[in-house]
């Protein structure tokens, strides 16, 4: 039977969201769960069909915007990249929909929280799908902002909490700052290419590789500028250094949200954008170098912050940020395939880690501070085992040519590609990325040990209630754990193997001289062992620090003093931004309102002439003069001013 | 058209309704009187809406000339005629006026506690005046309606204003009246120089001496700048929004568009050279307005004033788009004009929902309304997102196109205008948070009931249109696009013709 799989992969989630969101109260919680889960499972099945069929298609649904030469359609463009992303998005989302049925059950609220939650999850999945199937920049932007909205709504799900409100607004606005760059990138694309459709842009990009254009009065390289503007948007969405401050705060949202949006899917949209626009970015090597450097710095700095945090979800959040840094390193050295590979493996193991962390939090009646955990492993062994799998995959443990967990393959491919690219920035990224491997392993086992081993530090009350999660929360973790275990081993051939071009079927574009994955075979053998050589000591030191000598971390922190505080306070990004932007914006706004409007403009304008007229009137004794005459007089003066200005101007 | 004077009927039908109300209904606060006046009001305004829709149905988008033209001799001594007609641009403003009046009448029921009958009259008169502005093709006739708008406005602001009543009324009326006086002078000068006040003759035939055109543009500019309002002529707007019932502010969404309409019709079409000369000035004022008003909105502590400043910022996009003289800028300006009328009306009706229940305007006095008023919270969220310009809503299309157009004119324009994306999100989300999120710790706020059927009926058409405009704008755009293309190509022909000389 010939079914429109592309439609079925995108729209059932919208339908589910609409039904649960609009009629949740009427149909009840159970029906809302049913309809949203059915929608996303259907979408997942259709996505897998698309992926396995491997056909390329571009289905225009309807025109959207047409103005002058500018036009954009509502479209579903399917190729390997889109189909793979759809499979990841809908697959992970299905698991998280099911998990949420259990996780959100105890969340009794006056309104029908459950229906609302499920509707938001499905709505997010719809926007994310629209993002990846677009054939033009505008629909990409639609999905992009739409997932931002869903993220805002879900971070703020517990909207009574001030901290959730703050985090949600922060996430939206920081993302909007990135989108400001994205929008300018679209404007510049239209200016340069005369179109915002991928196909047109990609066709014209090679011819413009060495062109310059005027931007903000300066003559700058055209494609580099456009790519950097677009990348600014990617930095916001993917929480890269500078626009990352929202991600850790976003952990205010319920844990399934963190798993789906702030780990597996939405935050990887920036990586997807670079892969999708590879035929454009390939002709802007300077922009790619910037991408690599930003990715490397993010990777390293986020990992270092992860070493010091105590909130279980924030540790994993910084880990996510750091792993996104790896993906950008890969994209920056033109190893887009490696970037998407890591995107996929990361989706599995990070979703698993978040959901397992959710199980821990659930077991401990809402406790998130690692300092109040400990000694849980016998009580929740299944969760414990899943967490091990997740961390083994995250730390990239495995043996060359034998078997490794998912991250082993994808992360190694990235680091080797960075080295093989032969550029200075590639080397730089390789060094920072390798150092981050050590930190990754350290914070992972630090978390694992603090949460599950040692003496229980939670209240006896809480400990008495510790329980394994219900089946509805555990079962969805199984496919994720299988992915975290085998996805790297299974997928390496597609993403890093010799037949990767046959896999991608042209969805990615790499200039002949840029193919760093091709150079991986020439990387010396010892370099291939280096990541593992960094991970194992990380695990070892974490074991010593938190298992054998638990007093050492405190001593080390005191010994490091300022440096520790710098890292613990997340390099003071929030404080600096608050000082530079958030507070001044309010103050300037107040000034413009109170002084600008009410004193200066009104003072010179209506009120001023009113009072002036009153004074003049009194003095001259024309007590009966209304305002009108004086206003007219004032206006004529103003007009005279304008006109003389223009006369003098020429 | 010699046959049925459709435009005149549409224009004066509300006025006839107002006369009927005055004659038939008892004044004061008599309950039956109010019912009768509202009943007549609805019949008149819905009939107007029906006729307008019929007109839209008959309207031929491909024909860029004025349609449904009516001509009659009015003051032959001065060659002044009664001319009416619409094109692809004005047809939408007529539709908006006709649509928003019944919505405004609905909001009278909850929002106007005293002298509702008189309010109905004022609102119907206002509708006639607005329809007159958008359908008149003689400058004098245009002026009569343009000024006529001030009468109901002055009465409404003065008689139904909440606090510092006198101040708001005088401030707004004097502000706008003074602008209008300059316009009157400009119209006389035009008439003396061109020998006619027939806009169809003046458009496309701007044979006014260049020096004179500059003066004329300035005079019109001040008038339209105040009406729009463009920074720094905007300070009357927050007072009016703050003080008047929602029923009026709903209409003022269209009222502000008289300025935008004037800029296109009289600025671009009748004075193209002067418009070009003044474009940098207007654009910079618009850009300052976008940033300035957004920042000021961020600092507001009263919900109605946030919407007011947000309106000033959005109107900045309209003038920015027009004076960028690009396809997208023009298109976007028209779209913002449509979208903003709906969104501003909806947002203002939105903040009036709790205001009418509790009489509180301070944002900080609310909070947690998402708990007890989920339907209201969801509705307000959609309109907030439209104001923020989220893709998929009407707000996005307009903001995107105007900023794209401005960018093409000069990348600085695009960059500055795009900051509105960030600032707009900031003030709207802060407002939303203040109203709907946080704990329900205020008993009076927590006790409020969700929106009722009447309120849903006000929001429903706006909701549908905001999403429809955002998802498939072509359905609206195809009506005005040919006319707009013609306006642009005529404009360019004039400018290029000039440089070729």
Image: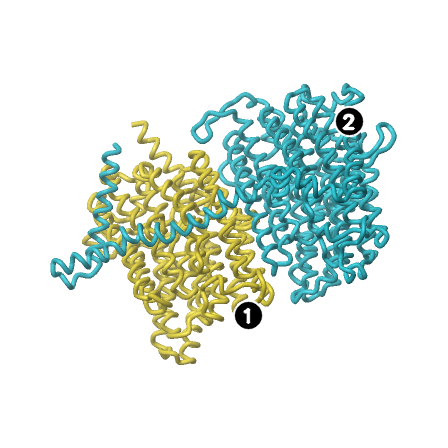
Secondary structure beneath dot 2 equals helix
Q: Which residue is mark 2?
A: A530
Secondary structure beneath dot 1 equals loop
Q: Position of residue A90 (x, y in %)?
A: 74, 46
Q: Position of residue A650 (x, y in %)?
A: 25, 32
For residue B393, above or below residue B447:
above
Q: Residue placed at 50% from the left, 67% from the top?
A: B354
Q: Residue placed at 38% from the left, 64% from the top?
A: B243
Q: Nearer the viewer, residue A264 or A212?
A: A264
Q: CA distance from mark 2 to mark 1?
A: 67 Å
Left or right of A175 in this view: B134? left
Chain under disc 2: A
Left or right of A579 in this view: A249? right
For residue A509, above or below residue B442:
above
Colour in which chain B is shown?
yellow
Mark 2 touching mark 1, by CB under 8 A? Answer: no
The image quarter containing residue A536 is top right
Q: Residues within 10 Å of mark 1 (few under 14, many from 20)?
A: few
Q: Which residue is mark 1?
A: B452
């Amino acid at each position: 039977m010939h079914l429109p799989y592309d439609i079925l992969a995108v729209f059932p989630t919208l339908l589910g969201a609409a039904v649960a969101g609009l009629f949740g109260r009427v149909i009840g919680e159970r029906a809302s769960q049913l309809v949203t889960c059915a929608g996303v499972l259907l979408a997942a099945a259709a996505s897998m069909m698309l992926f396995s069929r491997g056909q390329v298609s571009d289905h225009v649904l309807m025109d959207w915007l047409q103005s002058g030469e500018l036009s954009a359609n509502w479209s579903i463009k399917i190729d390997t990249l889109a189909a793979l992303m759809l499979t990841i998005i809908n697959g992970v989302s299905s698991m998280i929909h099911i998990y949420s049925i259990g996780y959100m059950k105890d969340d009794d609220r006056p309104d029908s929280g459950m229906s609302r939650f499920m509707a938001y999850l499905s709505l997010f999945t719809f926007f994310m799908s629209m993002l990846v199937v677009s054939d033009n920049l505008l629909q990409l932007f639609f999905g992009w902002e739409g997932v931002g909205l869903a993220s805002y709504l879900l971070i703020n799900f517990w909207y009574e909490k001030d901290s959730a409100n703050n985090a949600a607004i922060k996430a939206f606005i920081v993302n909007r700052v990135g989108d400001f760059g994205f929008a300018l990138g679209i404007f510049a694309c239209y200016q340069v290419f005369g179109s915002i459709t991928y196909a047109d842009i990609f066709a014209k990009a090679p011819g413009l590789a060495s062109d310059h254009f005027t931007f903000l009065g300066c003559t700058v390289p055209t494609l580099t500028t456009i790519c950097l503007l677009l990348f600014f948007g990617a930095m916001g969405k993917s929480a890269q250094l500078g626009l990352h401050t929202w991600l850790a705060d976003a952990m205010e949202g319920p844990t399934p949200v963190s798993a789906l949006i702030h780990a597996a899917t939405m935050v990887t949209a920036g990586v997807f954008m670079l892969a999708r626009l590879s035929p454009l970015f390939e002709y802007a090597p300077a922009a790619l170098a910037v991408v690599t450097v930003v990715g490397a710095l993010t990777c390293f700095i986020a990992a270092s912050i992860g070493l010091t945090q105590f909130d279980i979800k924030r540790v994993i959040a910084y880990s996510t940020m750091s792993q996104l840094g790896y993906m950008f390193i890969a994209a920056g050295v033109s190893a887009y395939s490696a970037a998407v590979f890591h995107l996929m493996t990361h989706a599995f193991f990070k979703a698993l880690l978040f959901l397992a962390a959710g199980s821990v939090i659930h077991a401990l009646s809402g406790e998130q501070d690692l300092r109040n955990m400990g000694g849980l492993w016998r009580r929740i062994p299944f969760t414990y085992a899943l967490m091990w799998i997740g961390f083994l995959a995250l730390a990239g443990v495995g043996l060359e040519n034998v078997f490794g967990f998912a991250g082993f393959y994808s992360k190694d491919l990235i680091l080797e590609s960075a080295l093989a690219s032969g550029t200075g920035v590639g080397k730089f990224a390789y060094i920072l990325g390798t150092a981050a491997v050590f930190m990754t392993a350290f914070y992972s086992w630090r978390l694992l040990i603090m949460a599950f081993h040692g003496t229980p530090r939670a209240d006896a009350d809480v400990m008495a209630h510790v329980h394994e999660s219900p089946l509805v929360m555990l079962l969805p973790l199984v496919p994720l754990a299988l992915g975290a275990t085998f996805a790297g081993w299974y997928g390496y051939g597609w993403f890093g193997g010799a037949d990767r071009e046959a896999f991608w079927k042209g969805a990615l574009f790499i200039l002949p001289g840029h193919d760093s994955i091709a150079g991986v075979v020439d990387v010396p053998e010892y370099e291939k062992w280096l990541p593992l050589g960094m991970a194992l000591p990380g695990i070892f030191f974490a074991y010593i620090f938190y298992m054998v000598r638990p007093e050492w971390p405190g001593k080390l922190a005191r010994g490091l003093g300022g440096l520790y505080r710098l890292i613990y306070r997340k390099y003071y990004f929030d404080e600096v931004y608050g000082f530079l932007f958030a507070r001044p914006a309010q103050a300037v706004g107040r000034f413009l309102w109170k002084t600008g409007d009410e004193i200066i403009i009104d003072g010179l304008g209506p009120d001023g002439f009113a009072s002036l007229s009153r004074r003049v009137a009194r003095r001259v004794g024309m007590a009966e003069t209304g305002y009108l005459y004086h206003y007219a007089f004032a206006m004529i003066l103003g007009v005279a001013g304008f006109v003389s200005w223009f006369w003098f101007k020429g | 058209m010699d046959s049925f004077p459709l435009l005149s009927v549409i224009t004066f039908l509300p006025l006839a309704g107002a006369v009927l109300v005055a004659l038939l209904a008892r004044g004061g606060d008599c309950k039956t009187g109010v019912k009768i006046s509202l009943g007549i009001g609805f019949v008149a305004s819905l009939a107007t809406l029906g006729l307008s829709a019929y007109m839209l149905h008959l309207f031929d988008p491909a024909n860029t000339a004025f349609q449904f033209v009516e001509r009659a001799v009015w003051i032959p001594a001065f060659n002044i005629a009664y001319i009416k007609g619409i094109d692809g641009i004005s047809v939408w403003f007529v539709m908006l006026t006709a649509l928003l009046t019944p919505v405004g009448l609905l909001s009278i029921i909850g929002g106007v506690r005293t002298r509702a009958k008189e309010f109905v009259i004022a609102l119907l008169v206002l509708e006639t005046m607005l329809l007159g502005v958008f359908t008149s093709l003689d400058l004098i006739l245009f002026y009569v309606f343009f000024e006529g708008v001030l009468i109901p406005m002055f009465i409404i602001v003065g008689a139904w204003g909440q606090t510092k009543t006198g101040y708001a009324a005088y401030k707004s009326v004097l502000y706008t009246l003074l602008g209008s006086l300059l316009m009157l002078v400009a119209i006389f000068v035009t008439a003396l120089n061109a020998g006619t006040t027939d806009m169809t003759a003046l458009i496309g035939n701007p044979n006014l001496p260049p020096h004179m055109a500059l003066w004329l543009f300035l005079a019109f500019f001040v008038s339209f700048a105040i009406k729009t309002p463009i920074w720094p002529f905007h300070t009357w707007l927050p007072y009016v929004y703050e003080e008047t019932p929602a029923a009026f502010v709903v209409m003022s969404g269209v009222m502000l568009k008289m300025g935008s309409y004037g800029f296109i019709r009289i600025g671009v079409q009748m004075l193209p050279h002067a418009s070009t000369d003044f474009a940098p000035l207007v654009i910079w004022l618009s850009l300052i307005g976008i940033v300035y008003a957004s920042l000021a909105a961020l600092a507001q502590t009263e919900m109605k004033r946030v919407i007011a400043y947000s309106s000033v910022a959005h109107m900045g996009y309209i003038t920015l788009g027009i004076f960028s003289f690009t396809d997208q800028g023009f298109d976007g300006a028209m779209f913002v004009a449509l979208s903003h009328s709906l969104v501003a009306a909806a947002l203002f009706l939105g903040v009036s929902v709790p205001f009418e229940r509790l009489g509180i305007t301070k944002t900080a006095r609310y909070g947690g309304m998402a708990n007890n008023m989920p339907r209201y919270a969801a509705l307000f969220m959609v309109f907030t997102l439209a104001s923020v310009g989220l893709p998929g809503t009407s707000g996005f299309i307009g903001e995107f196109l105007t900023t794209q157009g401005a960018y093409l004119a000069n990348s600085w324009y695009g960059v500055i205008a795009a900051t509105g994306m960030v600032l707009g999100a900031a003030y709207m989300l802060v407002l939303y948070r203040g109203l709907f999120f946080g704990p329900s710790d205020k008993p009076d706020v927590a006790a409020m009931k969700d929106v009722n059927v009447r309120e849903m009926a006000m929001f429903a058409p706006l909701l549908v249109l905001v999403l429809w405009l955002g998802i498939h704008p072509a359905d609206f755009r195809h009506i005005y696009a040919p006319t707009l293309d013609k306006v642009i190509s005529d404009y360019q022909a004039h400018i290029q013709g000039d440089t070729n000389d």
